[in-house]
Amino acid sequence: MQVDLGSLSFAEGGYLLVKRAVRRAASGDAIVVTADAADLDVDLRAWCRVEGHRFDWQPGAGTARGQARIVTGAIESERWAGARRATGDGEADEDTIAEHPPRSWGLAARGATIEAGTPDFDFHLTDKIEVWSDDAARIYQQAVAAQWDPETAIPWNAAFELADDLEDAVVQVMTYLIENETAALIVPSRFIAQLHPHFREVMQVLAIQAADEARHIEVFTRRARLKRSQLGRSTIGGQVSLKTLVEEPEFAIASFLLSVLGEGTFLSLLWFIERYAPDPVTATVVRLAAQDEARHVAFGLAHLGQHLEREPGFRPRLADAVRRRHDALRHTAGLNDEVFDALLLMAAGSWDHDALRLGSQRVLQLMQDMDEGRRKRLVRLGFPEADAAALSALHTRNFM
Ligand SMILES: [Fe+2]
Ligand SMILES: [Fe+2]
């Protein structure tokens, strides 16, 4: 093999040509290197010593330049001898997902060739069955395409003036929503840091879900402060309920409680607020948030559905989680009265007796819609109707 660097100096990039030749050669092959530069023998000799190749300088006769002769060593090939491809079966394309990717694959891109001996990372979520969904890539793409800009998507400058009580009600509902959105941001964020990056699409779905919640927090805060300088109330019952979510250590269970039951219930709530919103800003912020929530619910259903298909024995553990959470919250009020009253007033639209009666019926209908939605999703996850009804009834009164 022959490499002529011509006027290109070794340090300038000539070394890349030599390196390429070495990589193509087998261990023990000879490569002849020539160049115009006078210091080729110095640079190349030093490089060969570091890289483990034998180097001989053959001086030219008379004024002719000499040439270098390299005999390639085995270091390059040996260094990569124990390398593995970070794919499901070590050989197939990068989209083959491993059942239990080793922690030593670390942050390497799926499909990359990984040098043997890379350090273990402390990932806790390393089992495909617990986290994976074949729908993750599609859901992520949808989420990316559906991102909206709070600045332009919401008619912040729309002219409206609500009666004081009604504005108070909106501010209270927004205060409650912000608190719940904060839990919904923290839960996926916590698990991103524990997830093996081999499950790239799941990591991306969780990341964009957290970004969605960040936007929800922004727009609900802006609506709350549109006409007021002070926000509404936060109660012990609400916070205790959310604390059980934020502290749930197991991904699949947290996802079940948050995405399937909590965000599922929130879909009904957000649609309700949109329907009875007294102003266009309130209607728009909840409508946009509900679009995002529908995806969060879809991902929860997708990966849990796939999980349960492969491990039906996991279903009773999900049911236990609902019962445990219910027991833990037994002595708390759940939804604060202020939120309930604010929803009723919003749905009534005024203090008129007939309006209040109607508002009250609408809130009752909301509770039924929420329950129906939860039962439907539980049935989709394979729970028998009766179990679904019983579990739905045990869901937190705080909704999320
Ligand atoms: Fe949200
Ligand atoms: Fe969400």
Image (tube, rainbow, N blue to C red):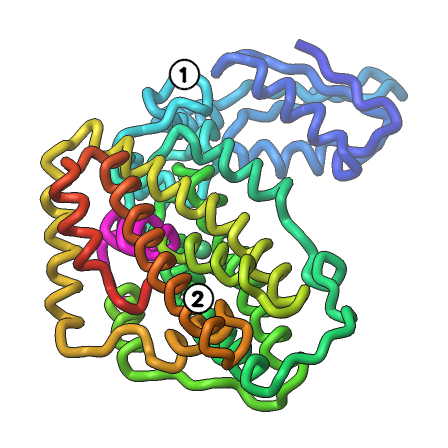
Q: In the rendered view, does 133 fall on the left or right side of 33?
A: left
Residue 193 seen in this snapshot: no
Q: Amino acid at mark 1?
A: Ala
Residue identified by numbered label 2:
358
Quadrant into which the C terminus falls: bottom left
Which quadrant holds residue 189?
A: bottom left
| Vertical placement of residue 92 versus 344, above or below | above
Per the model, the C-alpha gap separating discs 2 and 1 is: 62 Å
Q: Amino acid at mark 2?
A: Leu
Residue at disc 2, secondary structure:
helix
Label placed on residue 341: none
In what quadrant does ligand 2 lie? Answer: bottom left
Q: Nearer the viewer, mark 2 or mark 1?
A: 2
Mark 2 in CB contact with mark 1 (< 8 angstroms)? no
Please state the extent of the stretch shown in magenta in the rendering. 247-264
Q: Residues within 10 Å of mark 2 (few under 14, many from 20)?
A: some
Instruction: Count all numbered tags in the image, as a single digit.
Output: 2
Tell me where residue 38 appears, x and y as whole percent: 83, 33
- The front one of 271 and 144 is 271
Label placed on residue 92: 1
| Vertical placement of residue 65 versus 321, above or below | above
Considering the whole magenta stretch, tell me its main secondary structure. helix
Residue positioned most to the bottom: 230
Which quadrant holds residue 387?
A: top left
- The front one of 170 and 216 is 170
